[in-house]
Image (cartoon, helix red, strand yellow):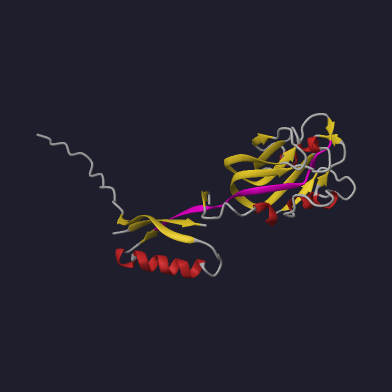
Amino acid sequence: MDKLIHLILLSGLVSAAGSLAENLALKGTATQSSTWSTWTAQRVIDGIKTGPSTVPYCCHTSSVSNPWWRLDLRDIYDISTVVITARSDCCSNEASGAQIRIGDSLENNGNNNPICAVTPDFLLGQSISFSCRGMLGRYVNVVRPGSTSILALCEVEVYGVPMRKRTFLRLKFSSSAAVESNKILHQLRSVLGSHISDFNLSWTQLPKKEKKPIADRGSCVKHQ
């Protein structure tokens, strides 16, 4: 009798094991709506919050409507915390009133993604931590909505764990003799291992026989 096998291939979207102490921003790339002088977007994820002069370590947009800065994490993460550091020389208000947005969409440059928090007023050189636990996304945006303004940030840190895809396979075998659960997993690992470097296989349920429907025998009418 035929057997059905249900297999789960874990490749997200479930949280994978990871260290919350790792600043994910250091592995990403950054861009912003505009750049004033040499205050580029990438300087916000260099791991340096402040220095003798803020210029080499901070980003600064031109004075425009809705200035924004965006981090591409290059993969989907379950983001727990975002930490923002303001300028220490002056103008710490240039990081105030900004929306922190997290998601996978690049619609409106990523500024339509869900909001984690809105930044309050900063003191000079102050770092403020924002809890975004449970928010999933590849992009982290910091945008100051509204009238013409400047956005200046000196460091953005992002903490969380990677997500893995979850794929379900349904296998059917013509003979029960061909079904050996451990052997099947071993063969699949051998095949997938040559194409995927990080994956896990497990059964969602053990192989079992498929119940075939009983054939309809119709009705019998006895005539006298």
The location of residue 75, given as percent across then percent down, is: 63, 53
The furthest residue to the left: 224
Q: Quadrant of the N terminus?
A: bottom left
The furthest residue to the right: 37
Q: Determine if the magenta segment contains residue 182.
A: no
The location of residue 6, given as percent across then percent down, is: 39, 55
| Relative height, residue 9 to residue 195 (above, below) | above
Which span is picked out in magenta? 150-171
The location of residue 28, given as percent across then percent down, is: 70, 54
Judge whether residue 74 can be spotted in this image: no
Q: Determine if the magenta segment contains residue 152.
A: yes
Judged left or right of residue 110, residue 205 is: left
Judge whether residue 140 can be spotted in this image: yes
Query: 177 or 164, which is in the foreground?
Result: 164
Judged left or right of residue 100, residue 91 is: right
* Residue at the spot 84% in from the left edge and 42% down from the top edge: 61
Q: Which secondary structure class fits the magenta region best?
A: strand
Residue 183, quarter of the rendered image: bottom left
| Relative height, residue 190 to residue 34 (above, below) | below
The location of residue 115, given as percent across then percent down, is: 65, 35
* Residue at the spot 80% in from the left edge and 48% down from the top edge: 58
Judged left or right of residue 216, residue 59 is: right
